[in-house]
Amino acid sequence: MLFSKKITWCVLSILWLGLMFFLSHQNGPDTFNTSHGFTAWLAQLLGVDTEFLHGIVRKAAHGVLYFVLVLLLCGWQILAGRKLWVALVLAVVFSVFDEGTKPLVAGRHCDIEDILLNDVGAVLGYVVARFIRMDSRLG
């Protein structure tokens, strides 16, 4: 039973990493269209201006994606008998790698601010995982 839970958390973590890598390595126009389409839907739902919201959504996405990543990695680390800080280190390393490879994609660039937003999301995910004592909720 423990083995299948560990595999589940591992697979979810890897799938999430794959989604993040896919989203961050779309070319310039494709990433704009993806975020703008989501923003238009959200703006209509909230009754606010799409263009105003678009910049916020693009920046907030960094934190949200890394927040979820760390929660998934924490679940995996707990079941693997490892310390939670390993999840945070893995997320920060991936953040630097992810941003560092963006200049290889047409219309993309590496942005230190994005790395910081990623890392803030990762740290918040780590704090939440520690705070809610995630290990008691994995069952």
Image (spheres, rainbow, N blue to C red):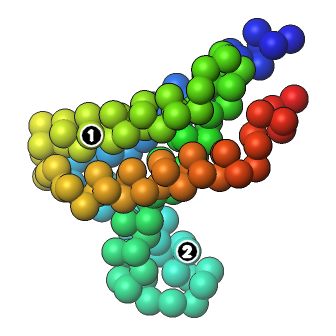
Q: Which quarter shows the C terminus?
A: top right
Instruction: Give residue 42's mark.
Output: 2
Tell me if 108 is positioned left or right of 44 in this view: left
Q: Eyeballing the image, is 57 above or below 121?
A: below
Residue at (37%, 40%) from the top-left corner? 92
**Residue 101 shows in this picture:** yes
Disc 1: which residue: 96
**Residue 33 shows in this picture:** no
Which comes before the other along the chain, label 1 or label 2?
2
The local secondary structure at tag 1 comes to: helix
**Quadrant housing residue 54:** bottom left
Check whether the beta carbons of the residues at disc 1 and disc 2 lie within 8 A of each other: no
Residue at (38%, 45%) from the top-left corner? 23
Q: Eyeballing the image, is 77 above or below 85?
A: above
Decide which of 50, 109 is in the foreground and name it.
109
Where residue 40 sits in the image (x, y, percent)? 47, 75
Q: Eyeballing the image, is 95 above or below 39?
A: above
Where residue 67 sits in the image (x, y, percent)? 54, 50
Query: What's under tag 1, amino acid-wise?
Result: Val
Where residue 118 sits in the image (x, y, percent)? 38, 52
Q: Residues within 10 Å of mark 2 (few under 14, many from 20)?
A: some
Q: Residues within 10 Å of mark 1 (few under 14, many from 20)?
A: some
**Quadrant housing residue 124:** bottom right
Query: What's under tag 2, amino acid-wise?
Result: Leu
Residue at (76%, 49%) from the top-left corner? 132
Residue at (62%, 41%) from the top-left corner? 71
Tell me if 54 is positioned left or right of 88 in this view: left
Decide which of 120, 97 is in the foreground and name it.
120
| Mark closer to the observer (1, 2) | 1
The local secondary structure at tag 2 comes to: helix
Q: Which quarter shows the N terminus?
A: top right
